[in-house]
Amino acid sequence: MIAEVGEQVTDAELAAQCRRDPDLFVIVHDRYYRDVYLYVAGRLGTQIAEDITAETFLLAFDRRDRFDPERGSLLPWLFGIATNLIARHRRKEARHYRALARLGPEPVVEGHESRVVASVAAERMQPHLAKALAALSGGERDVLLLVALGQLGYDEVAQALGIAIGTVGSRLSRARAKILALIDKETVHG
């Protein structure tokens, strides 16, 4: 039986209950939909985020018997499923970043001085950041965006991607170095 109102059910308890009563999976959906959606939207844009997020929860529902509570909470497991689905769209993702890089900054609309300064800085960096993200390997991009957009720790990223924590650290380190070098090169020479 699901916990009483006001009692927080752990992911392990919830997963076990969902195995017996599939209707309870709606709690998993309600608890983590927003986090998964924001991660996917950050990776692929809002137009496809709803579809990928829905597919993530559909696969999680179908595979709910495979969740191992010993490995951690449901969120990294869901992020792992989402990341695998995103991998199917990797070419589209890379094209998306290249297109953003080609757009360049949009003209700034007159307004409050501080808003204009912040907007100009962000607009000018967007194409450089997009180009740098497109230049990363898939593994580096996955780790960087799980940390930045998913706000996962190293252990959760490792769980989500099925890699060692040391691999997470090295990929993140390489990704940061490449991003900084490419942005520096673009802003100095670009």
Image: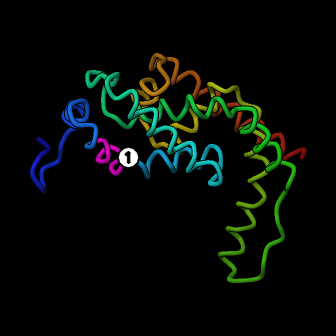
Residue 47 is situated, as x and y percent measured from the top left of the image, at 65, 53
Q: Quadrant of the N terminus?
A: top left
Dot 1 lies on which element? helix
Residue 105 is situated, as x and y percent measured from the top left of the image, at 82, 61
Q: Residue at x 12, y 56 (%)?
A: 5
Outermost residue, bottom side? 111
**The one of 148 and 2 positioned closer to us in this rendering:** 2
Corner quadrant of residue 76:
top left
Residue 59 is situated, as x and y percent measured from the top left of the image, at 46, 32
Judged left or right of residue 42, residue 81 is left
Q: Which residue is mark 1?
A: 32
Question: Quick check: is 29 in the magenta stretch?
Answer: yes
Please state the extent of the stretch shown in magenta in the rendering. 25-31
Amino acid type at circle 1 is: Tyr
**The one of 91 and 154 positioned closer to us in this rendering:** 91
Above or below for 124 versus 167: below
